[in-house]
Every structure is written in structure tokens, then in C-alpha cells.
Image (cartoon, rainbow, N blue to C red):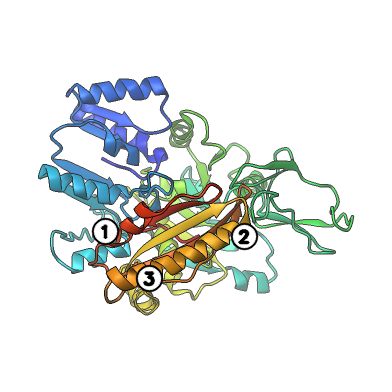
Amino acid sequence: VLVPEISLTPQTVGRFRGRFGDLVAVMHSRMSQGERYDQWDFIKSGAARVVVGARSALFTPLSNIGLIVIDEEHEGSYKQDSAPRYDAREVARWMVERSGGVLVMGSATPSIEALYACEQGGSWTKVDLPDRANGKPLPTVEVVDMAAEFRGGSRAMFSRKLVEGLRSELSLGRKAVLLLNQRGFAKFLLCRDCGFVPTCPSCDTSLTYHERGRMLVCHHCGHTEIAPAVCPECGSPYLKKFGAGTQRVEAELRALLDGMPGVGPDVPIIRMDADTTSGKGAHERLLEQFAGSDAAVLLGTQMIAKGLDFEDVTLVGVINADTQLHLPDYRAAERTFSLIEQVAGRAGRADLPGRVLVQTYEADNVAIRAAATYDRERFLRAELPKRRILLYPPFVRMANVLVWGRDEPSVRTTAERLFTELEAHIRDFGGDGWSVLPASPCVLAKLRAVYRWHVVVKCPPEDDLSRVIAPLFRARVPEADVNVAVDVDPNDLL
């Protein structure tokens, strides 16, 4: 049984051990070497009948596999983006084909590729669960137009409706979940006099401001430096923090709750993001703290959007639904739709009714509107024609040929040469519907002092992409200062 996030493992393990007792093994990367060895030995001995874990649990020595369950199959975390590059969903499908078992992939927001595969027939079967397992209604979702709030004179991070929702639910001893798809105290610093933004010396990205210690941190390579008191370029003291991360939201939320009648400082705020969950057992400890409180707020990033099951959560707030919407990634709208619908499902899971407030500056965006009405068909009617015209999955398969190194001219030369070689190779062996996009810098063109280019290959979905391009790369002589890797069915093209 695979889950997409380590944070979901404790609840999932609890459910399975409640049914199957000591027959359940657990495997994920946050365990110590000794713990992983013990679980590996337990599985290999044959005493374990069920293995629960993140994607690496797929490779445990469980024999005679009859069933593989992939929960939240739409999640990108099932694809490993570093060598060995694999998709746990594809590996699982290959495993059950060999063993004669069954693969069940579940999600409240199935990926477009999975829905398309079901429509094509074959070995895929779609099973709809139109209602919640316990028969409870889905929570109502209200879109809050933050642009209108701003025009009305409100400059606060929390809309009036969200503030009132928090007050009414917390004063009754209920719980709330607030989602922010960022981390850090503010996204970046900007000099209001000259426009200077501190950037990472090794990556082509701005540094993220962290309030604790007044630090600037690169979330790609880990570079850290003290935030300057004045602009290093012009000496101006007017450095403004732009954006909102979980630390800043936590600070403003604490101030809001402390002054709220009927709520006050006794209501805990449990923050879950990459910083607070980095320690061993942190996920489980934070979730136990949230579960053990009366009124409480769980504030976090994407990791809190799915799988968590608390009966007394009656309010969910999305601080800014637009965060992913304009990433240069063809899946941006799909990910926004899924995230909103997933986090909405955390509310009203038992007898108490739920309510969801989605704050956005793009209240008319189709992905946001469709998610607010649980209308996947509306979203697909808008999204699929774009994918078809622009030739993106599920209408093609893709390979992203990554080229990287420390010398930019060498990287560019290698990428352009690969484009020429791939074009000739595809012309001879690819067939109709194959194409190669010209070499270009990646969106994240420089990371950890390494320059990155890529070449994208597209082919019809029924063709064997790997079989055609593998001979070219197997015959290629590696270069000393430039690396090349092929990512088949990439999760994104950033």
C-alpha cells in the first residue's frame, strides 16, 4: 500500500494495523537504517503480509504479491526525478502483470492520464465512488475574491469571511485547517529604491526570507546568508518583504487569534512544512498534537492537503489558491484544481458540517471555479483541448533530455548537438507523430552553480518511446564536463 507523503504514513499504518495487527510492515526514507533493516528482514521472512509506505516500499522483498494499492495516484511524488528515474505507478503495473495480481489506484482527483487510460479501455477499469464512504455530504466551497477585498480597502492576509469563519468555529471548540503552498517567512526581499532582489550565487533564483534568525535561504541548494539591513546595491534602507510563507502566516494568525473574542492565546497553531517536519517522527508528533487539542489550527503546505482524517475539522481555508497557477508548467491548472479539491475534503468528514473558503486573486479562473463546485467535467472541457492542440500528455508521451554542467557554453553546445542527433534519429526510426523540440535553457536555468538545458522528444501515446531513443544514448560517448540524462514521462519540464 503506497501513500504519496511520509506525513500520511502514521494514520494509514494505524488503520491497517487496527485490522491486520502484526502482519503489517512499514517502510519509508525517514526511518533509521536499523529500523529499515528490521522491517526488511520482517518482510523477507514472510511474516509480513502487508507493507505500507512511500514509493520505495514498492521494492521491499514481499513475495507472492496479489494486490498493490496506490493511494492519491495523481501525486507527482510517485515519480522519482533523480537517478534511477522511475514512476512507481508504472513499476507497480509491471509487477502485477508479472505476478498475476491486481493494481488499484485511488484518488478523489485522478490524474488526466489515468482518466484517459480508462477511456481507452484495455486493462484499465474506472470505478466511481460518487459519495463519501460514510455518506456525509461534501463541504460547501466558497471562492473569496481577494482583488475585490483589496479594492474595498482591506490589506490583510486573511479575508473578512475567513476571519469570521475562524472565530465562529474555534470559539465552538472545533478545528480549522489552513493551506499555504509556500514555505519561509516571505518569498523574497526587494529594494523599493533600485529594485534589487538578493539572489543565490549558485542558482538562478531569488533567496527566500526566513524570519527566524533573519536569514535568506535558497530552497534549491541550501545556500544561507544573513538578510542585509540596507540594500547592497544602493544602500537604501527600504527593503520590503514580498510574498507570504508559513512562518509569516503563522505570526499574523497568532496575532489575529490572540485578539479574537472567545478564542485567544490558548488555541494552538500547529505548523507543518518542510522546516518543522524535517526531524525524525515530526509528522506523527505534530498530527498527534493537533488531534489531542480541542480548538486548534493546522497550518501547512501541500502535505496537509490530502489523506488526513480528523472528525472535528469544520473549516478549511486556502490562503492563496493562485500560487501554482502561473508556473511555466503544462500541469499548473491541473495541480491547482486537484489541490483545492483535495484540501476541501479535509472538512466535514463526520457529523459536523464542513465549510471551505478559497482566497484567490483570480476568482474567475476555470480551475478554481471547477474545484469549488467539484465539477471535474467542467475543468476537463477547458483543459483537454489545450493539451491536444499543444501536444501534451495524455495525447503524447514525452522524454525530457536534460543536459547540465558548470560551463555554460559546453552545456549549450552539447544540448544543440543532441537536438541535431535526435532529429536525425527520430526521422529514421520514429515514424509519424514524432517531434523533437529545439534545445533551450530549462526554466530553472541554473541550480547549485550548474547550468541546465534540455531537449524534449514527443511521440504518439501508443508508441514505445524508450525503445526508439535508447540506442542513440547507449551508443553515445560520455563527456567529461557535461552530464546527460533522459527522463521518460517527466513530471514537469522545469
Closer to the camera, 94 or 277? 94
Whichever of labels 1 and 3 marks the residue nearer the N terminus, that label is 3
Instruction: Write down the residue under mark 2.
Output: 409
Q: Residue at x 30, y 32 (%)?
A: 14
Q: Is residue 441 above or below residue 309?
A: below
Q: Are marks 2 and 3 in contact (CB under 8 Å)?
A: no
Asked which quadrant contains residue 271, the reply is top right
Of the two numbered discs 2 and 3 on the same chain, state the one appearing first in sequence.
Answer: 2
Label 1 sits on what residue type? Arg
Q: Residues within 10 Å of mark 1 (few under 14, many from 20)?
A: few
Q: CA separation, marks 2 and 3?
A: 23 Å
Residue behind mark 3:
424
Separation of residues labelled 1 and 3 (CA atoms): 16 Å
Judging by the rendered image, the residue that carries numbered circle 1 is 467
Mark 3, residues whose alpha carbon is within 10 Å: few (<14), some, or many (≥20)? few
Identity, as a three-letter code, of the amino acid under mark 3: Ala
Q: How many marks?
A: 3
